[in-house]
Image (spheres, rainbow, N blue to C red):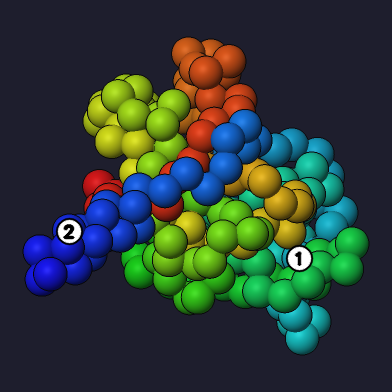
Amino acid sequence: MISKFILFGILCLALFQTSVLAKSVKMTYYWIAQESDHSGSKSVTIKTCSGKRIAKVSRSFAKAARMEGTARLNSGKVINLDCDCHGGYSCFTTINQRRYPYGIGAKDNVLKPYVSVSANDIPIGTTLMVKQLKGLKMPNGHTHSGCVRVDDNGWSFGKNQIDFLVGSKKHYNQIDRKYSKRLDKVTIARSSCHPN
């Protein structure tokens, strides 16, 4: 009798460790927007949620900062979304770039390139196995294990999508050139894996 209960427990644990959540999930990418990548007149004032001025920047950079969620100003300051922008740019906070070099996640957690994903229909902290990522060489030189963690939510997309943090637009371009067809739609499974 006891052996049946043990076997059942092991089976349940195995099912919990890796269970397919969804197939054909759209995978997109995000990175830190860099003011140095944008030109144009400094016509937009980026502000805190309470309206305090942070910086005056070009419209294209302001849009990129809002889209990506984290951005680096030419002054070296790093800003992060902190509230709903309501179509404007009074929605940022300045963050400690040593503590949060790639931004702050939904639970004030540290975001990490090639580990962090944003999702709107999977709980924060959930680790996932992305089958199509496993074994791919990333721009940082490491081979990806396929394991990622939901560290953030995305304001610009809905459900059945994950947004993979790649750190920089340059890294996104490298991944897109090499793997765009393979990583357009992915299969994700809840997993007890440990992201690198």
Residue occupying image coordinates x 62% and y 32%:
24
Callout 2: helix, strand or loop? helix
Callout 1: helix, strand or loop? strand
Q: How many numbered dots are placed on residues in this image?
A: 2
Residue 46 in the image: state x and y as whole percent: 76, 65
193 and 91: which is toward the camera: 193
Q: Earlier in the sequence, mark 2 or mark 1?
A: 2
79 and 38: which is toward the camera: 79
Q: Circle 1 is placed at which residue position?
A: 46
The answer to whether residue 176 is left or right of residue 54 is left
Residue 170 in the image: state x and y as whole percent: 51, 28
Residue 123 in the image: state x and y as whole percent: 53, 66
Tell me whether circle 2 and circle 1 mark residues in contact (CB < 8 Å). no
Residue type, mark 1 in image: Ile
Q: Is residue 84 above or below residue 76?
A: below
Q: Quadrant of residue 138?
A: top left
Q: Circle 2 is placed at which residue position?
A: 7
Q: Is residue 185 above or below residue 166?
A: above
196 and 139: which is toward the camera: 196
Crowd rating for badge 1 (residues with CA inside 10 Å; few <14, some 14–19, many 20+) = many
Residue occupying image coordinates x 66% and y 67%:
81
The answer to whether residue 176 is left or right of residue 138 is right
Residue occupying image coordinates x 81% and y 68%:
85
159 and 91: which is toward the camera: 159
Residue type, mark 2 in image: Leu
